[in-house]
Image (cartoon, rainbow, N blue to C red):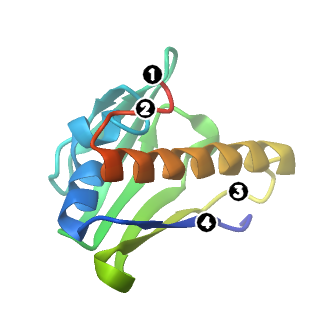
Amino acid sequence: MAGPLMHMVVIDSDAKKIYEALSTGKGLASFWTADSHAEPKTGSIAKFGFGGPVLEMKVEELTPGKRVRWSTHAGFEQWNGTSVTWDIKPAKDGANEVWFNHEGWPEQLPANDLASVNYTWGRIVGRLKEFVESGKPVPYFP
């Protein structure tokens, strides 16, 4: 397996607000893709549109205020077998750290493809911070 894609950001907000952004269609549409359909229900299928194929992720784990984890269900063939985890951890002065991990990548995936996905995730994590702290939607894919 290729190494996991990882990012960490400190968000000046409470864990509940961050969790809502990561676990609901409205929250996800506010920082990732405007075409987001998700519900905070384990076992449900979240759908993310990008003007072409629709990425489907199965909601594997929800721990309110602490963790959201998905596994790829359909849509992006090279993502098959991967999982995405968002962990929320307390930081100083009421802020929270969000640890992002996208793992399970096949070894044969070209390094430049992996680098491109990692770069995009980094920008999306930045949009999460911007949205949660300001309350203003800033989807990376409008």
**Residue at image location 48% in from the left, 58% down from the top:** 83
**Residue at image location 36% in from the left, 73% down from the top:** 96
Q: Nearer the viewer, mark 3 or mark 4?
A: 4
User: In what quadrant of the picture does the C terminus appear?
Assistant: top left
Q: Residues within 10 Å of mark 1 (few under 14, many from 20)?
A: some
Where is residue 64? Give x, y as percent.
17, 68
Q: Residues within 10 Å of mark 4 (few under 14, many from 20)?
A: some
Specify whether 124 is left or right of 64: right
Residue underneath mark 1: 142
Above or below, comparing residue 80 to residue 87 in the picture: above
Marks 4 and 2: CB-CB under 8 Å? no
Distance between the alpha carbons at the discs numbered 2 and 3: 28 Å
Where is residue 44? Give x, y as percent.
21, 46
Residue underneath mark 2: 139
Residue underneath mark 3: 106
Amino acid at circle 4: Met
Q: Residues within 10 Å of mark 2 (few under 14, many from 20)?
A: many
Q: Secondary structure at mark 4?
A: strand
User: In what quadrant of the picture does the N terminus appear?
Assistant: bottom right
| Quarter of the image where one finds residue 38 | top left
Q: Secondary structure at mark 1?
A: loop
